[in-house]
Amino acid sequence: MHPMLTIAVKAARRAGNIITQASQNLDLLTVSKKTHSDFVSEVDGAAEEAIIKVLLSAYPDHSILAEESGRQGDTEKSEYQWIIDPLDGTTNFLHGFPKYSVSIALKHKGVLTQAVVYDPNLNELFTATRGAGAYLNNQRLRVSKRTRLADCLIGTGLPFRDFTHMDAYLAMLVDLIPRTVGIRRPGSAALDLAYVAAGRYDGFWEIGLAPWDMAAGCLLITEAGGLVGDLEGNNTQLESGQIVAANPKIFAQLLQVIAPHLTPELIEAQRITKT
Ligand code: IPD
Ligand code: CA
Ligand code: CA
């Protein structure tokens, strides 16, 4: 295992332990609201602190982009940036719904090079190193082999915080439901993307994500032989927050169904981030 990935795994497991311990006493948690239906607890902060401590002890010069504490370090000076979601699926966690994960990715000179998504409930550790493949625990991952959208299970995320693109999103959903065998919305985007890498889903799409929801998942998918892009298939997903991911055969078919429902506002969001 690449030494930087080993450190990321150590950090993810440590956060996983904090989350699992707290899950046994959910009533004791102090929960606050960031915005409408966007909750955060002290567990998010404690898990993030633990991750950053492990990473910076090993690599004090690296910079950090983390959901709860924002940016640390100088991205101009450091070639390395860790992108962290300490608890992806906080709403699930707070309800005792066991679908949440820890997501840690590393960018080197702007390119994703290491990825970890850890599910503490199933003890499933998804890892990838650029050029060296994606793994679930010790098993090599490949995206699914399905070739017809009509045979596919597709994951998604429903808008829950920002409803600007609700109509366009619902139009995509309505169009896709009868064209697939089913749509799922478990509630942890990082884990959803890991499931595309693992071939459990054939594809996934969502609008309004943050880089820490997606960074690790994107590398897992490309290293498992899949494709990732924005709603037009371009490479702006980490900046625009609009993502489509799938096996190579299904990617184009998903984009084709989505295309008629793209609004000028959605397209604009992808253009802004491209320049
Ligand atoms: C959320 C989850 C969810 C997705 C949201 C994210 P959080 O992350 O990934 O699946 O639909 O867009 O914000 O807030 O629980 O870390
Ligand atoms: Ca998240
Ligand atoms: Ca989070």
Image (spheres, rainbow, N blue to C red):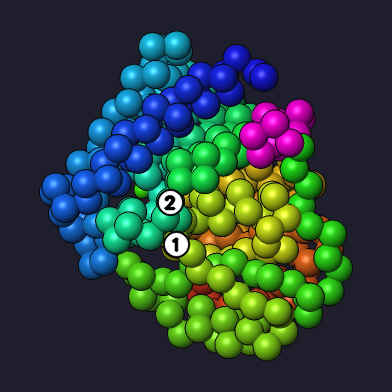
> Vertically, is 180 above or below 113?
below
Q: Which SS class for mark 2?
A: loop
Residue occupying image coordinates x 65% and y 18%: 2
Side (left or right) of 219 relative to 46:
right
Q: Can you say which quadrant of the picture contains the N terminus?
A: top right
Instruction: Note whether residue 210 is visible.
Output: no
Query: Residue 24 at what x, y percent from top left?
Result: 27, 45
Task: Return the residue at label 1.
Answer: 187
Q: Give the range drawn in magenta.
A: 128-139
Side (left or right) of 135 relative to 57:
right
Q: What residue type is labelled 1?
A: Gly
Task: Return the residue at label 2.
Answer: 100
Q: What residue type is labelled 2?
A: Tyr
Q: Mark 2 touching mark 1, by CB under 8 A?
A: yes
Foreground residue among 171 and 132: 132
Query: Residue 32 at what x, y percent from top left?
Result: 15, 54
- Residue 137 sits inside the magenta stretch: yes
Looking at the image, which residue sits at the far front?
24
Foreground residue among 193 and 218: 193
Residue occupying image coordinates x 39% and y 18%: 54
Quarter assignment of residue 48: top left
Query: Residue 72 at what x, y percent from top left?
Result: 33, 27
